[in-house]
Image (spheres, helix red, strand yellow):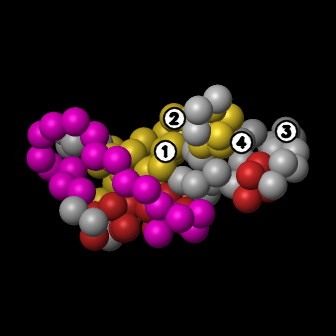
Amino acid sequence: MQHVNTLCGVVTVDGIQYEWELRREPQRNDFDGWLGMVVALMQVDMQRGALLEFPPPKRLVKGLKPGRLQINDAIITRGIRAALEAGWEPTSRGKPVTFEVDADGN
């Protein structure tokens, strides 16, 4: 059986379902250097999303080869909780809110 790296999914946090999707993998930018991955969040059946911006992996900053993309439900769940604590209101209207998180999703 072939292992497929999932780039989207649904997690349940405190009884509420949230959809997530990888929007950008770590990449190099001519002006800013390395940029980390970005994950889009949306509470199921709600209007306002959130974007989680992760820092670039340390190995890329040090000039090493890119490694395997590290994203899983635990990181997404911590990111959702951190965004909610920082003021994300999924039931409100408006543009997605962007949150910078650490490598662990906090």
Q: Which residues are magenta?
A: 88-106
Q: Give the mark, 2 or 1, whose residue is nearer the N terminus.
A: 2
Label 3: element kind: loop
In-image side of 45 versus 42 (left or right)? left
Residue on which disc 3 sits: 2
Residue on which disc 4 sits: 5
Q: Residue 90 at x, y = what percent?
A: 21, 50
Query: Do the CB atoms of the residues marked 1 and 3 lie less than 8 Å apart?
Result: no
Residue on which disc 2 sits: 23
Q: Residue at x 87, y 45 (%)?
A: 65
Mark 2 vs mark 4, foreground winner is: 2
Would you call the spot at circle 2 few (<14 residues within 10 Å), some (14-19), or many (20 or more)?
some
Q: Amino acid at mark 2?
A: Arg
Query: Do the CB atoms of the residues marked 2 and 1 lie less than 8 Å apart?
Result: yes
Q: Alpha-carbon distance for marks 4 and 3?
A: 10 Å
Which residue is at the far top? 30
In-image side of 73 versus 62 (left or right)? left
In-image side of 29 versus 11 (left or right)? right
Q: Amino acid at mark 1?
A: Val
Q: Alpha-carbon distance for marks 2 and 3?
A: 23 Å
Residue on which disc 1 sits: 39
Mark 2 vs mark 3, foreground winner is: 2
